[in-house]
């Protein structure tokens, strides 16, 4: 779609009623200036790819006085000519500078979104604003925003229904992807000339969302594969300092795992175009304040109880099945049963305790310079599920976070666990078939049998679940 063919949507309203917040959320652009004082004095355009353009306009300045000169548009054969004459007369008039600027996209044929804060009272100047927009004849919808108790909602709604095709609730700080699409769909129903373009934009935005989910699923599966096979190897430097070098290797191994997780979390944040949130590896941690190997993390995240038992039992049953096969079935399946019990028991033992880091030193009568010291991989059964929960916490937070939000959010392990449970996004709440597929994938990763076909199948299964939990 060429720039001249883009649907243009102008966001209008009084000063500090939330126009810029609406623009930031609709355009998925947290670079939009938002503040307690008026931040928009010129029209600012924000394009969503080559699909739709949003225009953040200055707030009305002197609407009641402007209406006195614009009321003739109600009887004019060409209403917009009255508005053009008004802009021509007052283009250098400081008294109407905001009105002239906000009318620019209106005169260019934009659809209109009029934003009101129902926590603020309806005043005569607002009635003038709504009448001015009615006189334009442009496709228009009113949005009910709220920054506090919506005590004036009834008055606003009664007035707005007289002058707008639709009146919708839209909380710019809580709106998710489905809310944004619903608003564009609503505009398509009142903007008949732009209907096909808006609906085409909605379809492409939906596909773009699916691409983000696919990207996130691949980031998470690649992270898990990397962490489950990660090792750190160093040659022994001094036979007299084996214990000291072992501690150094353990720390470097831990740092390697943490750095890889941080990298993946940053990739998820970038996939959803958030610039005001970050995951740092130095100083105070944002998003996840409790680290990967903190006891609180291990006590609250990952699989618990019989679910971890079942995941571990799957691997043990495979070993038991091989015993049955070795004896030609003479064990009557007891090998698989015994293997499952052993595997499940091993999984459950210590499942809520962070693993220690063990450096393996090949056995020699005495240590030799150059001997390989190896840390990893981590074999703890709950490790991949805890890594998964932390990645899911990042995903749920950014995929549902409106770009109008300016706050810095930090989640400790307890808050993260509560958010995962509230959004039904914890690994404990995953569908049984997905949990089984992931458990098998983790076993394959650890045995270096996780080929491209298995990876694609696992990514697809995880992506489908991400779609459910991001709604």
Image: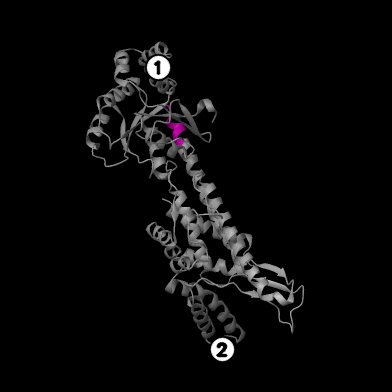
Looking at the image, is 446 positioned above or below residue 214? below
Q: Is residue 202 visible?
A: yes
View extreme (bottom): residue: 330
Residue 195 lies in magenta, yes or no? yes
Q: Which stretch appears magenta?
A: 192-199
Q: Residue 35 location, x and y as percent?
A: 41, 36
Q: Is residue 211 visible?
A: no
Magenta segment, principal secondary structure? helix
User: Which residue is at a point 44% across and 69% down the rendered structure image?
Assistant: 299
Please tell me how many numbered marks the rendered image carries: 2
In the displayed structure image, the side of residue 146 where residue 283 appears, left or right: right
View extreme (front): residue: 240
Pick the residue in front: 289 or 225.
289
| Residue beneath disc 1 | 94
Q: Residue 181 location, x and y as percent?
A: 42, 40
In the displayed structure image, the side of residue 300 where residue 444 appears, left or right: right
| Residue beneath disc 2 | 330
- For numbered disc 1, what is the local secondary structure? helix
Pick the residue in front: 343 or 147.
147
Label 1 environment density (alpha carbons within 10 Å; few <14, some 14–19, many ≥20) = few
Q: Residue 322 location, x and y as percent?
A: 59, 80
Q: Quadrant of residue 224?
A: bottom right
């Amino acid at each position: 779609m060429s720039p001249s063919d883009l649907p243009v949507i102008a966001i209008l309203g009084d000063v500090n009623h939330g126009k810029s917040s609406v623009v930031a959320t609709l355009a998925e652009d947290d670079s939009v200036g938002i503040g307690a004082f008026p931040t928009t004095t010129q029209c600012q355009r924000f394009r969503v790819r080559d699909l739709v353009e949003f225009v953040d306009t200055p707030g009305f300045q002197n609407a009641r006085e402007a209406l006195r000169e614009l009321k003739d548009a109600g009887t004019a054969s060409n209403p917009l000519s009255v508005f053009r004459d008004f802009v021509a007369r007052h283009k250098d008039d400081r008294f109407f500078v905001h009105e002239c600027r906000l009318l620019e996209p209106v005169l260019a044929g934009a659809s209109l979104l009029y934003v009101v804060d129902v926590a603020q009272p309806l005043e005569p100047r607002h009635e003038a604003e709504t009448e001015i927009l009615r006189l334009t004849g442009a496709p228009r919808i009113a949005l009910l925003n709220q920054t506090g108790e919506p005590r004036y909602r009834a008055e606003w709604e009664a007035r707005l229904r007289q002058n707008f095709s639709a009146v919708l609730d839209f909380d710019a700080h809580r709106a998710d992807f489905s809310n944004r699409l619903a608003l564009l769909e609503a505009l398509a129903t009142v903007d008949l000339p732009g209907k096909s373009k808006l609906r085409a934009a909605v379809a492409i935005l939906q596909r773009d969302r699916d691409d983000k989910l696919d990207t996130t699923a691949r980031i998470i599966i690649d992270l898990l594969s990397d962490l489950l096979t990660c090792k750190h190897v160093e040659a022994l430097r001094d036979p007299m300092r084996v214990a000291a070098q072992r501690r150094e290797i353990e720390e470097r191994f831990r740092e390697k795992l943490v750095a890889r997780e941080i990298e993946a979390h940053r990739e998820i944040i970038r996939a959803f175009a958030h610039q005001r949130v970050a995951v740092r590896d130095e100083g105070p941690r944002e998003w996840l304040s409790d680290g990967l190997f903190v006891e609180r993390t291990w006590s609250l995240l990952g699989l618990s109880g019989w679910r971890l038992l079942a995941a571990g039992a799957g691997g043990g049953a495979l070993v038991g099945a091989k015993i049955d096969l070795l004896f030609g079935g003479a064990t009557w399946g007891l090998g698989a049963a015994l293997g499952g019990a052993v595997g499940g028991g091993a999984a459950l033992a210590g499942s809520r305790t962070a693993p220690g880091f063990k450096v393996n030193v090949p056995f020699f009568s005495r240590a030799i310079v150059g001997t390989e010291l190896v840390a990893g991989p981590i074999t703890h059964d709950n490790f991949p599920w805890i890594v998964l929960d932390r990645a899911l916490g990042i995903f749920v937070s950014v995929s549902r976070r409106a770009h109008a939000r300016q706050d810095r959010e930090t989640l400790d392990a307890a808050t993260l666990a509560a958010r995962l449970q509230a959004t039904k996004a914890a690994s404990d709440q995953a569908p049984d078939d997905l949990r089984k597929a992931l458990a098998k994938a983790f076993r394959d990763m650890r045995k270096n049998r996780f080929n491209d076909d298995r990876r694609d199948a696992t990514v697809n299964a995880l992506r489908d679940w991400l779609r459910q939990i991001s709604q």
